[in-house]
Image (cartoon, rainbow, N blue to C red):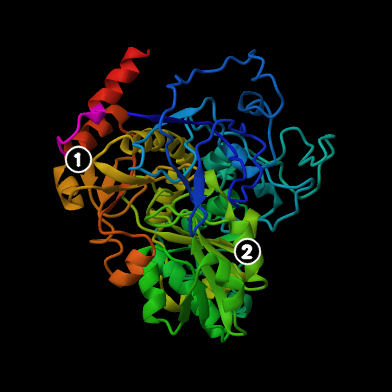
Amino acid sequence: MDEIVVGPGQMEDRNGLRQRPDPLHERPHQLPPMRSDLHGQQCLQAPAQLRRVQPQLMAENHSRASQPGHPVQAGRRRDTDLRGEIAVRHPCVVLQQPQQMEIHRIEYDRIRHMPNVARGPALRPRSVFRLLRMDSGSFDADDVPADPQGIGHSPDGTGRGVPGVPAPRALATEAVHAGRDDLARQGVHAAPIDLSTTYPSYDSRGEAARIDAFAADGGEPEGPPVYGRLGNPTVARFETALARLEGTESAVAFATGMAALSAVLLVRNAMGLRHVVAVRPLYGCSDHLLTAGLLGSEVTWVDPAGIADTLRPDTGLVMVESPANPTLAELDLRAVAHACGSVPLLADNTFATPVLQRPVEQGARLVLHSATKYLGGHGDVMGGVVACDEEFAGRLRQVRFATGGVLHPLAGYLLLRGLSTLPVRVRAASSNAAELAGRLAADPRVTRVHYPRIGGAMVAFEVAGDPHDVVAGVRLITPAVSLGSVDTLIQHPASISHRIVDADDRRGAGVSDRLLRLSVGLEDVEDLWADLDRALGTTSGTGRVLREAAGANG
């Protein structure tokens, strides 16, 4: 059994891969030959012989660890690059069968959350997210928590604050506090759940004026709520929190992710911009919605390099998903956004979450989530959300009001609660996923493993045998559609999530009939591997050899 030792961070630019610089990660010095494929993934192929290298934790006083930019040093400072969210403590050993196996990324290990602040030398003031007071239905300046040091945000590090701009907070802090900043002043700790469908008002003239204002631009009505389809205070808290995490002005929540995508298409259709340019693969139902033209849209499917040449005067949207469902193919979002020109780019960020990437910082205008997945994180709530600028958000609210695809307040509460543990869950599940990806890559019963270079908790792999037997053989892992829950799920995309996509289109997008998609949860990784090892069959003892080798070395 041969092994590849892949260091963390940026890969050397070979064969035109055009890797972007990543200042928080080491540059690996020993790399096997690579090639690039259609979506810019990296395929690592094992050389015939490689000496076994046992990874070791590096002490902070080590000569290499003391160099500026090393992950050990990066952990001591706040960096303006979002990709600082992932720090790598030591190289990851990737086990691989020569001439038999390809693994599609640089392997990361020991994924750890790092603070994140906004990009650039100065923070652009954003519109205030108005959380309606639950006791009076009004909003005033006293509802905004005071800066405990009285200095506001200081972009130049001098301590001189910018009036009206809150101090930047680490992503982990935003996950816990965004959408809840007014609770202490109200004398409550948990966010209230407002289940009202309607709200009394003795001022009918004022109600008429507020409804007219909403009809004009879709802005959130000032003052107390009016009706459940116009908005709900509990849902508004989730929207505020998600917008803060994604780095956008606003967010609009819907009953499901498909309702959210439908609203985006309806907004563009209403403007006479019915043409959509899209890159496969997408989530199967997203693919079907576009291909079938159910909402009057016309779609052109293209390779990422052909986006610019496919744009038309009536093109209203470019849609991508990165990492993609289910192959985990990745796109250079910044390059895609550049190719879009003035056409809005919608990036489905369901798999990555804002913990791993924020598409708006790479040029996307719209960020789509199936909130049912990682944002909720426990398999007990359905929802969807679009994070975007306030202008587009207003149009989405108008469509939501007209079509009724509202998020239930209880779902809004559960999603807000889910966000508070999002960084912790993504970090832990990603660590498990990276380990399982390496073990699957070492197993001769597996012919290919897909795992994105930005990390994450999703793994896709193709088996030599019958994938249906693997699904039927798991006992600890749950054989079910969906993903992002605290427990591990496995499914066969060609049979379930992407069954609705034409078979030729599905295979052309890399979704083979032997592909399995694994959503890795928070269980102990040894228990997960034991279940996978058993489900894959008894044709090889690779899994046992791996565990014994790991035990012999320490």
> Is 470 or 239 nearer to us in this picture?
470
Q: Position of residue 348 (x, y in %)?
A: 48, 60
Looking at marks 1 and 2 on the same chain, the residue that comes earlier in the sequence is marked by 2
Q: Which residues are magenta?
A: 536-543
Q: Position of residue 426 (x, y in %)?
A: 44, 40
Per the rendering, the mark at residue 337 is: 2
Q: Is label 1 or label 2 in front?
A: 1
Q: Is residue 27 left or right of residue 266?
A: right
* Residue 249 appearing in the image: no
Please, what secondary structure does the residue beneath circle 1 have? helix
Per the rendering, the mark at residue 357 is: none
- Above or below 138: residue 423: above
The amino acid beneath tag 2 is Ala
- In reply to whether residue 110 is colored magenta, the answer given is no
Q: Position of residue 349 (x, y in %)?
A: 49, 55
Q: Quadrant of residue 257?
A: bottom left
The N terminus appears in which quarter of the rendering? top left
Outermost residue toward the bottom in this view = 272
Give the residue pinned by disc 1. 536
Gap in Å between the C-alphas at discs 1 and 2? 41 Å
**Few, some or many residues within 10 Å of mark 2 (<14, 14–19, 20+):** many
Do the numbered discs 1 and 2 sit on residues whose CB atoms are within 8 Å? no
Magenta portion: prevailing SS class: loop
- In reply to whether residue 540 is colored magenta, the answer given is yes
